[in-house]
Amino acid sequence: MTNKAAGHGHSTQHLTDVRTRRVFASSGHGCAAIGWDYPGSTLLEVRILRSEHGFVSAGCAPEAGGGAAAAAGQTVVYSGVTGSFRDAGLQNGCLYYYTVFARHQGGEWLRWGEYELRPGVQATSVAGRLPAAFLRLFRRALPAATALLLCLAALAAAPGSALAAAPDVEQALAAEAVSAATADPVVAAVLEGTAYMTDVTPWSSVQGAPAGATVTFTWPAASARSATGLWPLLESDDGEPVPPYDTVEHHVRITDLTALQVDVLLRGGGVVQMLPLDGETQFQLREETWSPFSRFPWFTARPWVLLPLFLVVGALVIARAWRRSRSWNRRLPSMTRHDRQFLGRLAVMLFLLAGFVWQVYEAIYAAGAPAMDPGGLNAGDLAALPMLLFPPAVFLAALAMELTPSGHRVAWGLVSFLAAAGSIYNLAAAMTGTTTNLNLSYYILLGVLCILSAPRAFSAGRMGWSRNSMPRYS
């Protein structure tokens, strides 16, 4: 288990250079072990071949079994992404040849090294033997170095020694952080069935608040997960979490997930934040909604169910408006009809005003709320400003026309067309990208506005859909 800084944004991640690594080899009683590490955030696929006759020929890539590798007496003894391998059941005194390869997932194999391992004898690297002069100098300095190491070991083993206590405290803290993270049912559901690795970065107590740690879980691309549920997010996320650790819950749907960041408070504080990360695969954020839409996950997963309803109701309303606009008897004055028209117009005005206020509120909230995917297009970005302003502007234009005395028949037709186009655009954005409160609100409100404004394109007067502004009598 290693400790390293784990940032909250994708900008802090970088690809692993497959050419930069450290490989360690050793042998024991009836076994041999090879370990490796490398810098970077992505996992490399490592493959080790063993033979009793020699190394893999230069220029040849490792095979999964059979073919040229089997003919040359090579056996694939390891293939995976972990950081070490132990080959047990070997015969003492027999010389084994190990060839180590590594690559990015699906990339070209790079030969990392060749090692001659004899159980019970220290390993040697074919490509890295030292000259004889350096070996003689090493043998002369070995006794002094051994004495120094023995002194340091005795010092570290002494009771109360800081050297002995520090690793134990660090390991205990890391184990407590991992235990607190995996005890959370949401985290456990994501990690279920995966062979994950952990990375722990502690952060100290601030202003009397409990200390915590960031635990990063990673697993192979073959075990890429899909996750759905309510995930906590810190409202103020400026790098390392700071008190008072206020959180909000967002309903998310994520696919192709191979890395997870979990911020936990120690001493029983529990999980305060969960964030998806790009690991061996780039995750896809399909949904991130908050209240009230987060309470209806069935609808947020299928926003298209309203589209047939909009089409049927819109067709019926437009057909009725066209029929009324051609009807002679609807031009006669009627107080009851005036009352119905007044109440209808008042309801439309209230809807337009409420829709405008709701859209502005959702845009402001989305711009300041924490985001699961800081690298994506968010409401606070300047590039998203035109998409945020367009739907409220259409509602504001419709409200202004409803309050003015003119008929605005052409303008109502244009508003209906823009509302329909905006509604379909936001539906497409929700289905092909990330479903959010913003595109769901715009999709629903613009669809209703289209149904309300289309019949007004047939209106000949201010108060009605089928009367002239001046009534005619027969």
Image (spheres, grey):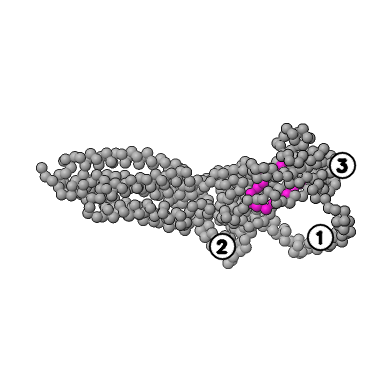
State the mark number for residue 242: 2
**Mark before the other along the chain sequence, 3 or 1:** 3
The answer to whether any part of residue 169 appears in the image is yes
- State the extent of the magenta-drawn residues as a range: 34-47
Does residue 356 appear to the left or right of 217 in the view shown?
left
Residue pictured at 16% horizontal, 40% vertical: 328
Q: Which residue is mark 3?
A: 93
Q: Which residue is mark 1?
A: 153
Residue at mark 2 to residue at mark 3: CA–CA distance: 58 Å
The reply to whether dot 1 and dot 2 touch (C-beta < 8 Å) is no
State the mark number for residue 375: none
The answer to whether any part of residue 87 appears in the image is no
Q: Establish if 77 lies above or below 43.
A: above
**Mark before the other along the chain sequence, 2 or 3:** 3
Residue at mark 1 to residue at mark 2: CA–CA distance: 39 Å
The one nearer the camera, 134 or 359, is 134
Residue at mark 3 to residue at mark 1: CA–CA distance: 31 Å
Q: Quadrant of the C terminus?
A: top left
Q: Check the image and name the residue furthest to the bottom.
A: 207
Residue pictured at 63% horizontal, 57% vertical: 5
Q: Establish if 160 lies above or below 288.
A: below
The one nearer the camera, 163 or 128, is 128
Q: Secondary structure at mark 2?
A: loop
Q: Is residue 45 magenta?
A: yes
